[in-house]
Image (cartoon, rainbow, N blue to C red):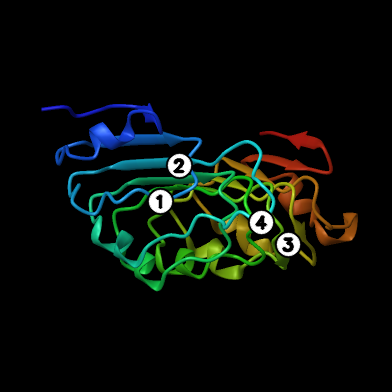
Amino acid sequence: DMEKVQFNDDIKSKILGFNNLEYLSFQYTETFPDVRHMKNLKALRLEGPYIWEDGAAPITIPSWIGELQQLEEFGLEDTRIYEFPVTMREMKNLKKVYLYSNDIKEFPDFIQYLPQLEEIVLSVNKIEGEFPLYLTEFQNLKYLNLANNKLSGPLPLEILNMSSLEKLDIIYNYFTEEDIPQELKNGDFEFLYFGQQVAE
């Protein structure tokens, strides 16, 4: 049985027949592959084309994604994704979410239903608004990357209650100096803001 394989679009059609794969990485893809039969899948990463053709539709996530109950890592990079099916709320084994460089304009709704998450990457998107307070209740969260978005407003002191947090990156947003409490700058985690780095 093949447990791990990494492939691009040239050979993925030959691989999708395998049912016991645990790791899949699709590169330069413009569609979401049908992997609903891969019940043992633990990690799925999709990378879109570096340059999209004008008028090309973004990749869409099918509702059956919630059936992949063993999935621990899910990543979409350069896919132009901007919305997520409600079934993603059911992915209770998911630990790592990487949604780098897409067209996301608000915090994905499904995230608030997955407090077990350990890593969240939402950098290089178009997310507006304030830092979601519910994230401060994620006691397993180690790494949170919100860099290169349009976030603004005061950061909550409750971030200090995130006992597992090791790194928080908020550079290149619309936060002002007044939005960032001194207590956070002195926190026991690596903190990237305004291009500066504070580490304890």
Residue at (41, 36) in percent of width and height: 26
Q: Which mark is residue 155?
A: 3
Residue at (58, 62) in percent of width and height: 82
Q: Which mark is residue 32?
A: 1
106 over 121 or under it: above or below: below
Q: Position of residue 86 (x, y in %)?
A: 40, 72
Q: Which mark is residue 55?
A: 4
Q: Position of residue 77 (x, y in %)?
A: 55, 43
Q: Which residue is mark 2?
A: 46
Residue at (60, 69) in percent of width and height: 133
Which residue is at the front of the view, 26 or 165?
A: 26
User: Alpha-carbon neighbours of circle 2 within 10 Å: few (<14), some, or many (≥20)?
Assistant: many
User: Alpha-carbon neighbours of circle 3 within 10 Å: few (<14), some, or many (≥20)?
Assistant: some
Q: Which mark is residue 146?
A: none
User: Which label sits in the foreground, 1 or 2?
Assistant: 1
User: Which amino acid type is marked by label 2?
Assistant: Leu
User: Which label sits in the foreground, 2 or 4?
Assistant: 4
Q: Earlier in the sequence, mark 1 or mark 3?
A: 1
| Residue 13 seen in the figure | yes
Q: Earlier in the sequence, mark 4 or mark 1?
A: 1
Q: Disc 3 and disc 2: Cα gap in Å?
A: 31 Å
